[in-house]
Amino acid sequence: MVRCPVGIRSLTRAQTFNHVLGNTAAAMLGTTFIWFGITFWAYLETRSVLATSFLGGAYMLGMAVLGVPFGTLIDRHHKHRVMVFSAVATSIVFSLAAAVFLLTPPDRLTDLGQPWFWLFCGLILMGGLLANIRSIALSTCVTILVDSERRANANGLVGTVNGMMMMVTGVLSGLAIGQLGLLWTLLISLAVVLLSLVHLLTIRIPEPEIVHVEGAPKAVDFKGAWAAVVAVPGLIGLILFTTFNNFLGGVFMGLLDPYGLELVSVEVWGILFGLSGIGFIVGGAIIAQRGLGRLPLRSLLFSCLGMWIVAGGFTIRDSVVLLVVGMFLYMVLIPFIEGAEQTLLQQVVPLAKQGRVFGFAQAVEVSAAPISAFIIGPVAQFWLIPHAESPRGQRQWEWLLGTGDARGIALVFVLVSVGGLILTSLVFFTKTYRRLNATYEAGDVNKDIAAFAPGEAADPIPGPDPLGKGHAES
C-alpha cells in the first residue's frame, strides 16, 4: 500500500486516498501495458511511422473529443460510480478486441489496407480512452480528500505512482511482445483491469452530495465548461500555452518509438523506456516531499524550458546512452508540468465544476497533439527522413546530428525543441502569467472541502457554501 504523506485529517480519508490512487494506478497499468504493446507490434509488423503516428494521433484526438463529455459525466455523478462505469466499459471493449484478434487471419490483421488492423487497434484505443475517465476523476478526488495546502504534494505522489506504472509497463510490454506475442499481452491487460474493478467495488469515497442548484449540467456541457474557465483570470491563457506546447510535443509522441526501435531491439527498447520511468518517480517524489514552490505556474514554465533543452539534445548523436539519459531527464520534468497545472486548477476552480474544467483543459490541450502527429508522420516519412539520410543531407547536417541511424527523426526533434524554447521564454513576459499568479495567490476556493472527516461535526462557516456551488456535505 502506498503511504500517503499528504496532510489529510482523517485516517479514513487517508486510507481512501491511498486506495483510490492505487486502484487508478492498477487500471493505468492494464491499459498502458496493451497500448505500449500494440504500438511496438504495429511498427514491427508494418515498419511504418505512418501507422504509429496515426495511432498516437488518434488516441490524443479521442481524448480531445471526449474530454468535456467525460468531465461532465464526473460532475453529474458520484466519482466512485463513474470509476466503476469506466472499468466495466474498458473490460468489455478489451474483450471485443481479443475476439477480433482470434477470429482474423494474421496476414489480414497486419495489412494496413484491410479494415481489420484498424478495427482491432480502434478497440484497444477505445478501451484506453474509457480508462482515462478514472484519471480525470482522480484529480477531483484529490480536491475532496486532501487539504488545500498539501495538494501539490499529493499531485507529486500521483506522479510518482504514474512513474512506477510507466516503468513497469514499459519494461514488461517490450518483453511481452517479443516473447509472448500480442494476444497474451492483451489477455494480461484485461485480467489486470478486471482485478482493479473488483478492488474498486470495495472502496467508498466520502463525497459531498451533488445538489446542482443551477440545474444538472447537460450530458455534454461545453457552455458550462467554458463559463467556468473564463471565470478564472488568466486560466484560458494557461490552457492555450499548454495547447501549443502539446502541438510541439505531439511530434515526440509519433516518432519516439520508431527512433528507439531503429537503435535497439523491441525487448531492449521496452526495458529502456520502462527504466526511463524512474525519472517520473524521481520527479514525483521531489514534489511529494517539497511541493511546487510559492508559484506553481513559474515552476511549470521553468520545467518546460528544461524539457525542451533535453528534448533537443538527446538525439544530436546516434547514441543509446544519450537517448536513455535524455529520456530520464525528460521524465523527471513531466510531473512538475502536470502537477503544477493540476494544483492550479484544484485551487482556483470550485469542486462542482472541476470535472468539466479538467475535461475542457484536456480536450483543448491534447487536440493539438494529434494534428502535429498526423502532419509530422507524412512529413518525416516522405521528406525529412529521406533528406537527412541522403548523401547531401548527411553532409549538410553532420555538424549538428553526427552520423548513424535515424538522423532524419533526430532533425525533427531538434527543430521542434527550438520552437518550444522560444515559445516558453515569451510566456514569462505576458499579462496572462501575471494574472494567473495573482489569482492563485488570492486563495483556495476549495480550502474547506477536505476539512472534515465523515461523521465529524463542522463548525458553522459564514459566507458561501465551503464545498463549492452545487455541493452540500452528505
Image (cartoon, rainbow, N blue to C red):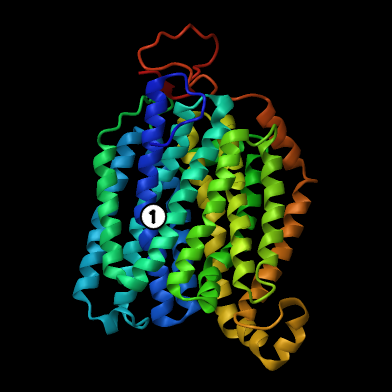
Q: Is residue 325 visible?
A: yes
Q: Is residue 420 shown left or right of residue 270?
A: right
Q: Which residue is mark 1?
A: 129
Where residue 269 sits in the image (x, y, percent)? Answer: 48, 69
- Name the foreground residue: 460 vs 101: 101
Q: Which amino acid type corresponds to the residue marked 1 in the rendered image?
A: Leu
How many marks the image carries: the answer is 1
User: Which residue lies at the image location 52% right of the left edge and 44% below the top edge?
Assistant: 159
Please, which residue is most extreme toward the right here?
Answer: 429
User: Which residue lies at the image location 65% right of the left edge and 71% below the top edge?
Assistant: 315
Report helix, strand or loop for mark 1: helix
Q: Residues within 10 Å of mark 1 (few under 14, many from 20)?
A: many
- Name the foreground residue: 225 vs 442: 442
Quadrant in which the N terminus is drawn: top left
User: Which residue lies at the image location 64% right of the left edge and 80% below the top edge?
Assistant: 407
Above or below 457: residue 408: below
Q: Is residue 24 shown left or right of residue 104?
A: right
Where residue 233 sits in the image (x, y, percent)? Answer: 67, 35
Please, which residue is most extreme toward the bottom here?
Answer: 391
User: Which residue lies at the image location 53% right of the left edge and 52% below the top edge?
Assistant: 278
- Name the foreground residue: 412 vs 359: 412
